[in-house]
């Protein structure tokens, strides 16, 4: 499909290119070097919705929330210099968590490049390590083909963020505009061809397995392989565990689901990783939070690793049967080849360990914090009231791990969090993006008192655009996760982790957002009902036990089998 228009400006070409890619929502912040593009946008407001955030970092995290819950590519506008550098954290976050973004930044006029002009920075040099691809455009004629390539690269293969930097003179320059979608790039093979030998080797291991364990990651959702995963799991009877970003890909209430792996994952899947005879990993990275001490990770198991990104295979854990493929394609073929099996006795071991974990944790918490509000109680009750169907966006820290453990995710693309980079301040803007993509769904942001204060200005974005995100602040008066580590490994020297906060409810009210504060267990039920049943945005601050800790926990450098329950 080619669209041709005679003599338009480069700025207009940007907007026409975005329309040709089906973009309906842009997050951004105007400034001098991108002003021509904003001027062009002014004439298309009926077809394209632009959300003015309060900070460029807010814009890019919102675009991430939008992309993660819609499956579309998020789009961001920012100006040159500080506008562009404010995107860097979001780019790094999106790269490591495989989120498709196209960021368009304005740049000073091409004759000023390299002169330290006002609001000039080397955006190409700065963004190169944190983008999947970046490109600077200095001629109007290059705008359309570059943006077509940007959308193709961002969304294909293992998705990621792309940045296109456009000089101001290229935005003013006139061109004969035509747009053609990009379908291939010469040196880039996004979708590897499925190798039959690899699949057969994997099948052989799976058919012979007595104690298999499957770990799924976000790759399931990125390839829309949820149905294929369910069919494969039910045919093979293999217990399914999830990484943090994989939660929601497999329904939590399913009898084969055995919980989350990793540093603060569940007891059973962590311990059983070092007992299984075949470990099948699909669409996930073996990062340090998953593996603990690599030299003692699943050494007894045959490892089958399915991933679209060749760079992830054998990077940390050696695969006995690597399968370089899209998760959907691989699971479809594997499901045909594997034998129908049940592993009931093995599965029972997981469920027994789960009961033990819940019992120990609840007894310990009851003993220590019997009359206080606790994070797990808040999230457990929220999970029950939403039936595991809300989109839950979490920030980074103790509340994030509690949400991962106690919220029963039953919908795909419903768990939005910063996994690989662990960016505090992520949740509020990301929840705005998630709500823009899913206006009909309940979007709940669960945030700590520390993380909230990093991006709280985005309440202004919610107010201006009437975005009905529900906010739960779990306030323990500490930077909780750092404090927990200080308690466990630094003899309780709480060095700069005590944090004071404003009156969050009054703050929300100043942005015309209703809210309340809860300090007693008996008030929690009604407060959550109010939060969920309010049509517009709502902020609930819950004062939780100050020194409650997240368990289970695999200490740094320990084996996953050495997971602690207290």
Image (cartoon, rainbow, N blue to C red):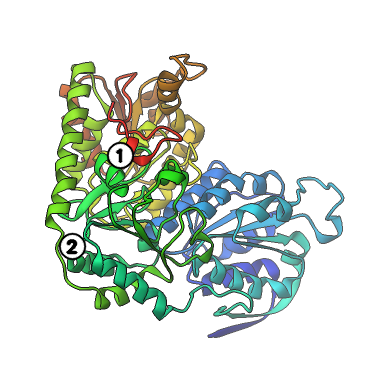
User: Does 273 appear above or below 459?
Assistant: below
Q: Secondary structure at mark 1?
A: helix
Between 408 and 239, the one lying in front of the other is 239
Residue 138 appears left or right of 321: right
Res 391 visible:
no
Q: Secondary structure at mark 2?
A: loop
Give the x, y percent position of residue 275.
Answer: 28, 48
Quick one: label 1 or label 2, which is nearer the N terminus?
2
User: Does 437 appear above or below 195?
Assistant: above
Residue 88 appears left or right of 562: right
Task: List the single residue furthest toward the front.
Answer: 300
User: Does 285 appear above or below 399?
Assistant: below
User: Does 304 appear above or below 259?
Assistant: below
Give the x, y percent position of residue 431.
Answer: 39, 46
Q: Quadrant of residue 6?
A: bottom right
Query: Residue 237 bears which disc, if any?
Result: 2
């Amino acid at each position: 499909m080619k669209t041709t228009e005679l003599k338009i400006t480069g700025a207009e070409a940007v907007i026409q290119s975005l329309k040709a890619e089906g973009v309906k929502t842009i997050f951004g912040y105007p400034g001098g070097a991108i002003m021509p593009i904003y001027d062009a946008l002014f004439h298309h407001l009926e077809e394209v919705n632009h959300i003015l955030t309060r900070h460029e970092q807010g814009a890019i995290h919102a675009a991430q929330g939008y992309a993660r819950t819609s499956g579309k590519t998020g789009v961001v506008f920012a100006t040159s210099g500080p506008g562009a550098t404010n995107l860097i954290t979001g780019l790094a976050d999106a790269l490591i968590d495989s989120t498709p973004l196209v960021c368009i930044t304005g740049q000073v006029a091409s004759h000023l490049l390299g002169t330290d002009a006002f609001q000039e920075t080397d955006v190409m040099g700065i963004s190169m390590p944190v983008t999947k691809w970046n490109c600077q455009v200095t001629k109007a004629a290059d705008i359309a083909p570059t943006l077509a390539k940007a959308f193709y690269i961002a969304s294909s293969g293992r998705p990621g963020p792309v940045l296109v930097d456009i000089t101001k003179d290229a935005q003013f320059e006139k061109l004969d505009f035509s747009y053609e979608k990009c379908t291939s790039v010469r040196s880039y093979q996004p979708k590897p061809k499925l190798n039959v030998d690899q699949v057969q080797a994997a099948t052989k291991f799976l058919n012979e397995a007595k104690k298999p364990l499957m770990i799924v990651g976000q790759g399931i959702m990125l390839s829309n392989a949820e149905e294929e995963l369910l069919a494969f799991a039910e045919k093979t009877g293999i217990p399914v565990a999830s990484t943090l970003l994989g939660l929601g890909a497999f329904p939590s209430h399913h009898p084969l689901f055995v919980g989350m792996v990793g540093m603060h994952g569940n007891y059973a899947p962590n311990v059983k990783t070092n007992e299984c005879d075949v470990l099948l990993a699909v669409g996930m990275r073996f990062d340090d939070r998953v593996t603990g001490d690599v030299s003692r990770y699943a050494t007894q198991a045959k490892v089958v690793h399915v991933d679209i990104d060749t760079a992830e295979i054998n990077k940390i854990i050696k695969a006995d049967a690597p399968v370089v493929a899209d998760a959907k394609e691989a699971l479809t073929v594997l499901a045909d080849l594997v034998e129908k099996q049940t592993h009931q006795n093995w599965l029972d071991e997981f469920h027994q360990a789960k009961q033990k974990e819940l019992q120990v944790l609840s007894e310990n918490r009851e003993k220590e914090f019997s009359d206080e509000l606790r994070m797990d109680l808040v999230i457990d009750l929220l999970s029950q009231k939403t039936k595991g169907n809300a989109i839950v966006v979490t920030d980074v820290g103790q509340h994030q791990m509690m949400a991962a453990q106690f919220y029963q995710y039953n919908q795909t693309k419903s768990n939005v969090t910063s996994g690989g980079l662990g960016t505090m301040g992520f949740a509020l803007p990301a929840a705005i993006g998630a709500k823009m993509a899913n206006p009909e769904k309940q979007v709940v942001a669960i945030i700590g008192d520390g993380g909230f204060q990093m991006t709280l200005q985005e309440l202004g974005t919610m107010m201006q655009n009437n975005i009905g995100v529900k906010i739960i602040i779990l306030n323990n008066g500490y930077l909780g996760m750092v404090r927990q580590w200080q308690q466990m490994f630094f003899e309780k020297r709480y060095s700069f982790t005590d944090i004071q906060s404003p009156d969050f409810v009054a703050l929300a009210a100043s942005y015309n957002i209703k809210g309340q504060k809860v300090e007693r267990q008996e008030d929690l039920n009604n407060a959550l009902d109010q939060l969920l049943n309010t049509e517009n945005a709502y902020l609930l601050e819950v004062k939780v036990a100050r020194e409650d800790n997240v368990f289970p926990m695999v200490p740094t450098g320990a084996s996953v089998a050495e997971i602690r329950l207290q």
